[in-house]
Structures are given as structure tokens and as C-alpha cells.
Amino acid sequence: MRIGIFGEGSDPQCAAVAREAAALGADTLYIDSRALDEGKPLSMLDGKTSYQGESVDDVKGFYVRSVPSPSVPAMKKDESLVLYEDWFTTFTQTRERAAYFLAWLLQLSHRGATLVNGPHAASVMQHKPYQLHALRSLGAKVPRTLISNDPAAIRAFHAEVKDVIYKPVMGGAVTRALDAEALERLDAVTASPVIFQERIPGDDLRVTLVGDEIVSCVAIVTPEQHLDFRDDPVYSSGEAMYREVVLPEPVQRFCRASARACGLTLAGIDLKQRARDFVFLELNSSPIYMDVELKAGHRISRAIARRVVEGARAVR
């Protein structure tokens, strides 16, 4: 049998999952998520799908590394981002390419194929307010949060909470402190809401869960703690280290329940830990984990491959 991997061909996580699938006796069909960008032939004829002239309908399980989304074409000019002159045509093309792949993934899901993760989950995870709602409804501890485009409400929240951070509703930028300079620019938020939260001190934890199995839980260790570890030059250069953490059973239960509530088979869950206090920050439907796998020896790729292979074998 064979499984599928949908992602960029150069992605090391895709390669690692393929190796683990081979160890389980499964061949791998790669469908490059950039295939349409590069003009490679894909077709759906009366619901039957082919990729570069080869039928792919026999594949009953996929590791979905990412789900493409439309992008506005921009370039840097004089230290600023500017649109291409023909941006609308290019944007429409990226929208249509994304729509094709999304429709195909939804079709696979409707037919009962095993997708880790499916497009529904990826779409839900883009919306951080829903994640917070799901976590809060389960009784998990989350930061005090205001999502608003109202400068008066934001100033009142800051006056009460004091130490406040902010980030986009759909992600895509690092977390920033709501400092004096940011407070002076609050009138800009009237155009679109922003997430404001109390700053939570403590260690940054990343939990990786596959199904109900917590495959990995580590604290991210760098010489200096940053507001957002992704903005730490040590982390971004691949020089961070990881300390294994054993979560208390109640926190493990919240991890499993939150992934299920958000429809995730594979989840990266970010928490803050201070002594015995654990605060949930967010979930990720396609976590980046290779550095943890290589340095901590946690077999995340094996768990993903096993889930896809076993799920594909169970499909009739």
C-alpha cells in the first residue's frame, strides 16, 4: 500500500514521515503543495483525481503538512512592502490554486480518507479566538484576553492588567508588548481587531500530540527569555536546547481534550509553566518539530506515520 504526503518536497518533516512510513511497509506518494505554482499537471475528472498523469485515488491516508491559502503578491521597495502592479491577477491565481487543493482535500475527507490534519482543522486553527473559547470551555487556564478594535476598551484593559501583550487574530506575526509607544498608536486598531492578553511569565513549553498520545513535551531553553520565543535569535538560528517535561495528568487531559475539541489529530500546544502552574496559550495544526525530534530524540515523525498508515489500512 501507499500513503500520501501533501507538502513542499524540500520540507524535512515530510521526508522524515516518509522514512518512517517506509519502515512500516508503506510507499509514499508526494503531492507537492507548490505543484500548481510550478505548472505541474493536476486534474479532477468527474471526481477522480490525477497528479502528473497518475491516478491518486488509491491513496487512503495523507500527512497534510500545510493547506495553501491565497496570498497578496508584494515586494520590498524602499524598506516597505508594495503590491505588484498586476497584483489582482496574481492574487486571483493563488486563490484559485488554493481553492483547488482545498476542494480536493475536502473530497478526500468526505470519502473517509485519513488526513493528519484535514482542512477543517487547519481552517479552525487560523482563528485564535476560537481556540481560546475551546480551551476556556473545557476549564483550561488561559490568559485574561481582550479582542477588540476599541481604543478605550484596550486602555481600560491595560490599566487593569498592567503587563499586556498583543498579537494578530489570525497569527502571522510575533507577540509584542503593549508599551507606551504602542499605546500612543492605538487609534490604528479601529481598522481591525487585535488580541490583547495579560503577559504570562514562566517557561515556554511545546507539547506535541498525535491522537491521544503525548509524543513530546519540552521546555524551550535559550540563554535569555524573550516575550515570544520565535523572535529569539538563538531559537530562530536553530541553536535552542530542549528540556524534557512530564506534565501532570490533569494537564495531559486538557491537552487531549483541547485537541479533540478543535478536531486535531496532530497538535502542537503551547503553554507557559511557572512552578506547578500551567497556562494554555494556543494550538497549532501543523507544528514545526524537527529540531525537537533531532535534539530530544522524541519520535514524532514515527507517531505521525503510524497514525496515517494505520488509518489508511482501516479505510475500506
Image (spheres, rainbow, N blue to C red):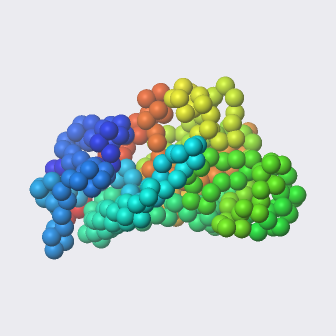
Q: Residue at x 85, y 52 (%)?
A: 162
Quadrant of res 143: bottom right
Of residue 38 and residue 211, the one placed in the foreground of this image is: 38
- Pick the quarter of the image with the C terminus: bottom left
Q: Residue at x 33, y 58 (%)?
A: 115
Q: Is residue 215 left or right of residue 6?
A: right
Q: Residue at x 59, y 28 (%)?
A: 234
Of residue 34 and residue 108, the one placed in the foreground of this image is: 34
Residue 231 coordinates in the image, percent (x, y):
62, 38
Quadrant of res 246: top right
Rendered position, 34 above or below 119:
above
Quadrant of res 62: bottom left
Q: Is residue 21 left or right of residue 248?
A: left
Rendered position, 155 above or below 40:
below
Q: Is residue 261 left or right of residue 2?
A: right
Q: Is residue 161 left or right of residue 72?
A: right
Q: Residue at x 46, y 42 (%)?
A: 288
- Report if residue 105 is visible in the image: no
Extreme residue in the right direction? 159
Residue 212 coordinates in the image, percent (x, y):
46, 52
- Report if residue 84 is visible in the image: yes
Of residue 162 and residue 17, the one placed in the foreground of this image is: 162
Extreme residue in the bottom direction? 46
Residue 41 coordinates in the image, percent (x, y):
18, 56
